[in-house]
Amino acid sequence: MNKWKKIKAITMDVDGVMTDGCLVAFDSHEMVRIFNAKDSFAIRVALMRGFRVGVFSGGDTEGVRNRFLTCGMDPDDIHLGCRGKIKDFRSFCTKYGLEPSEVLYIGDDVPDVPVLKAAGIGAVPADAARDAVKAADYVCEAPGGKGCVREVIEGVLREQGKWYFDEGEYEKIF
């Protein structure tokens, strides 16, 4: 896709995108999510290649925050407890001097629709909600939590000639 060559930042929702959307609830009120390591690795590669990566999620737990911190994300780019994702998306773009057309967003449900429409590329997992699919430019082959983030990031980086692995560079950063 030609639009993929213009992308400078990758942003996403968490539940239903980085995870399969299932939550395990404990009596302690803690919610547990399962993340795909391949998705997380792709975030690291994107960061190594100079892309900004942002997260906008309605959920807000230290476990989620820590997952993205271990991927090397800037803590200021992890937006949890969002109730208006488009506002946070626009702030992210302004902060980094990006046009929305230069930012890809991956979302899976109704609260993601405004951002999917505003982003240069709106992508959804294969199992996204109907309204999100209608708003998307790209529907992944992989479902949420099963490699859809990797699919999209790898696609962008390959299109730009930036999908490669340097073990020495990786070791220095992570």
Image (cartoon, rainbow, N blue to C red):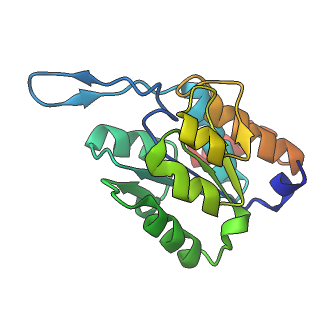
Residue at position x 38%, y 61% in the image: 84
Q: Does 75 appear above or below 139?
A: below
Please tell me in which quadrant of the rendered image residue 62 appears: top left
- The reply to whether residue 36 is in sight is yes
Q: Residue at x 65, y 38 (%)?
A: 42
Where 5 sits versus 68, above or below?
below
Give the x, y percent position of residue 54: 52, 56
Q: Quadrant of residue 166?
A: top right
Question: Is 161 situated left or right of 50 in this image?
Answer: right
Q: Is residue 171 visible?
A: no
Q: Nearer the viewer, residue 119 or 135?
A: 135
Which residue appears at 67% of the width and 46% of the height?
136
The x and y percentages for residue 111 are: 44, 49
Front residue of 69 and 152: 152
Which of the two residues, 118 or 156, is positioned nearer the viewer here? Answer: 118
Q: At which x and y percent is residue 30? A: 18, 30
Q: Nearer the viewer, residue 142 or 48?
A: 142
Instruction: Tell me which residue sits at (71%, 33%) in the image.
Output: 151
Q: Residue 44 appears at what percent x and percent y?
A: 61, 43
136 left or right of 32? right
Quadrant showing the C terminus: top right
